[in-house]
Each structure stands twice: as structure tokens, then as C-alpha cells.
Image (spheres, rainbow, N blue to C red):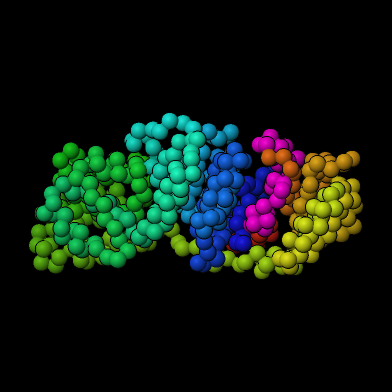
Amino acid sequence: SSCLPPPSSPPPRPPPSPSAFAAPAPAGAEPLLLIIEDDPVFARMLQGLARERGFRTLVATGGEDGFALALRARPDAIALDLGLPDADGWDIADRLRADPRTRGIAVHVISVRDRPQADQRHGVASYTTKPADLDALAQVFADMTRHLARPLRALLLIENDVAKRAPIMAALAGPDVVLDVAASAAEALEALRNRTYQGLVVALDLPDMDGLALLREVRRDAALAAIPAMLYSAGAVDPEVRAQAVELGALVVGEAGREREGLAPDAAEFLRRVKQALPPRRPAAPAPAAALRGKRVLVVDDDARNLYSLTGLLESQGMAVRAAVGGAQAIAQLEADAGVDIVLMDIMMPELDGYDTIRRLRADPRFAALPIIALTAKAMLEDRDKCLAAGASDYASKPVDADQLLAQLCAWLAAPPPPPA
């Protein structure tokens, strides 16, 4: 299992920065799928299908948690429901596309809403209507896998003259580059709505809009405001046009006599900019055993079977486990020894339940920032909200998903990132 972050960080503990857990997966690990879905049955079905196809999974039950988790975990793909309890899925898709840290992640929508027109799909990679049969879902995963196999650099060349395309395409060609071609500004804008590109090559003379005007239109889109762009012309470029293009962050190619040198130097500079703009590859992160080894966890549950199974799981990761049968015993143990690193708190306990236990702990300054993960057999959104409102740091449903619980423990016990220089 890999160390992955929790979906949210509510008070009283200050939320970690978005970059704190941005590199959760070991190098060479299976791709990570983030499922943003409030139907627990359908989410579990997607998890099962994903795991059969070699994906690791994380689940968020709401849009805000899903967006926060996408920032931290940087998944390889996202399955997104539109009818979320706290946000419209299209808004989440737009935010994912607008943020430089997530705009390269393919978003696959699975929703009961009717399929939208192509120009209303907000740049998502695929759209599947519920109820979806196994064949339809298999196609979704085929699309995900195909997207993951895409080259490092996908560029869009906007040029209507076939003869002029050839030298540009030859100059930009490479084993890790794929060039899509649009013959007009309208085609280019539609392509940008429906696919993620790492760079744009724009001809100055287009049939429906000049290249400079198209660049201005592109820069109005928050998701494309910083995408590397090259504006080129077969002849000289007017100094005023050149100045405006440079203000828009574009490399300008087009001078008399340029054919003597060829396009290679400009193409190399453009590809260098594209490479610099790519999100960094995720470095390896410690395996759970390394991240959790030696950490002290208090497991609070009135069911001996749960205590036994959780103790076995956590001790297998090198954690020092203490157990408390009920809320009152948990408080007493923590007051006697405040050195516990994290608490797993069952909610449905007799006498003093998990909600009241957490509230009492949060009232003590010694435990105000102690990570507490609430565990409950209920999977309703209101139960999760109630746990967080009581002061829990995070939430996990029972029966416990071992991989996900270990991921949450890793995230909450990770050292905070160094302050920015």
C-alpha cells in the first residue's frame, strides 16, 4: 500500500498545504484513480473494477473533498459524478482544469444526467451515463488506460495550410511528442475544450481569426493562461504584433531569411518551455511500514473483534498499538500518557460515544491538534459531517478498507513540508 492523503483537514487542526502530500506514490507504482462519488455502492463497484485493472483507488464522497484530495494525491485519473451533495460536478471539473497542478489529469464523468453536447463537456476525457453496464464501464477504464499511455508532450498545431504544416511538424517531431492539428481557430478552441495539451503552435494567418486574437482568447481561459505557446509566420512579423505576442507569453517565430537557419532552434526552445511547464514527476514516497513504524496509535472500540483486527493490521506496519474499550477509558489513557501520535475512534459506543469523546479531548489544549480518525459503520454523508463537526480530523467507514486507512494514517503522520524559501 502507498501513503495517500486524507480527503480534508477540518478544524481544529490547521489544514496542511496542498503540496504536503502531493507525491504519495512510489516510483513505478500502479496508477492511482480518484473516485468522486457519493453513492457508496457504486463507488465500491468502481473500486473493484479499478483494482482488477491494476489501479489503486481513493474515494471522496463530495466535490470539495474530491478537489482537495486531487491537489494532494495528484491521481493519474479521476472518475467524477456530477450530482454531488455539496457541489455541481461541472464546477469541480472546471476547477480541476483551471488549476495548473491538476489540469493534466484526465477526468471521466459518470452521471445520471443526459450526455451533453461536445462543446458543453468542460474538457472532460469521457462521459458515461448511469446506469452504466459493465461494458460501458470497461470502456471508461480503457479510455483511462489509453490516456495514461499518451506521450509526455501533446501539442496542438493550428494551421490551415497543409504545405506550411510540414516544416513545423518536422521540427517538433520526437518520440515523446504527439501533434494534433486544427485548421481554424474554431477547431482549435473545440479541441482545447475536449483534450488537455501541453503546448500550442499558432499560425499568425488563420481563416477565421488571426493568430494573435486566438492567443488572446486562449489566455482568457484560466486553465490555459500559462500554457506555452508559439506564434509563427512564414514571413516577417510586424514589431507591434511581436510585442503583443510576447506580452501574451508566446515565443514568436517569423523573420526574413529564417529559412536559412531552419526552425530547429526555435522548436528546441519551444519544447524546452513545454518541458519546464510540465508538472514534476512524483518522487518515491516511503512505504507505509517505513512511514508508520514506531508511531503510537490508540484504538478506541467497544468490540473486541474490531480491536483484534485493527491491532493486527497496525502492528504489521510497525506501529505501537494501545487499546481502549470505550470513550472514558480512552480519555483516561491519554491523560495518563499524552504521547500518543494518532487515535482511531469508533463512534457507536455505549455510555460515552465517539462524538462526545472527541469533543472532550478537543476541549483539552493538550489534545487540540491530536489527529483523530473517526470510524463508523454508517456511510451517510451526514454522519461524516457530524464526526468532523465534533472535531475529528478525518473519517473512515466500517468495515475498514485496510489500504485506505493506512493511507490516511500515513498522511496524518507525515512530517509537515518545509516552509517556502
Locate residue 68, reporting x and y percent.
56, 47
**Residue 397 in sight in this render:** yes
Instruction: State the image coordinates of residue 304 (x, y, percent, origin top left).
Output: 85, 53
Task: Please state if 173 lies on the left or on the right of 116 as rendered.
Answer: left
Q: Residue at x 85, y 48 (%)?
A: 302
- 176 left or right of 38? left
Q: Residue at x 16, y 47 (%)?
A: 160
Which quadrant would residue 11 be assigned to in this image?
A: top right
In the rendered picture of this protein, how many numbered marks are placed on residues? 0
Q: Residue at x 33, y 35 (%)?
A: 119
Residue 369 seen:
no
Residue 397 horizontal/vertical position (percent): 69, 45
Q: Can you say which quadrant of the picture contains the N terminus?
A: bottom right
Observer-nearest of 322 and 18:
322
Magenta-drawn stretch contains 395 = yes
- Quick one: 142 or 254, which is closer to the camera? 142
Magenta range is 380-407
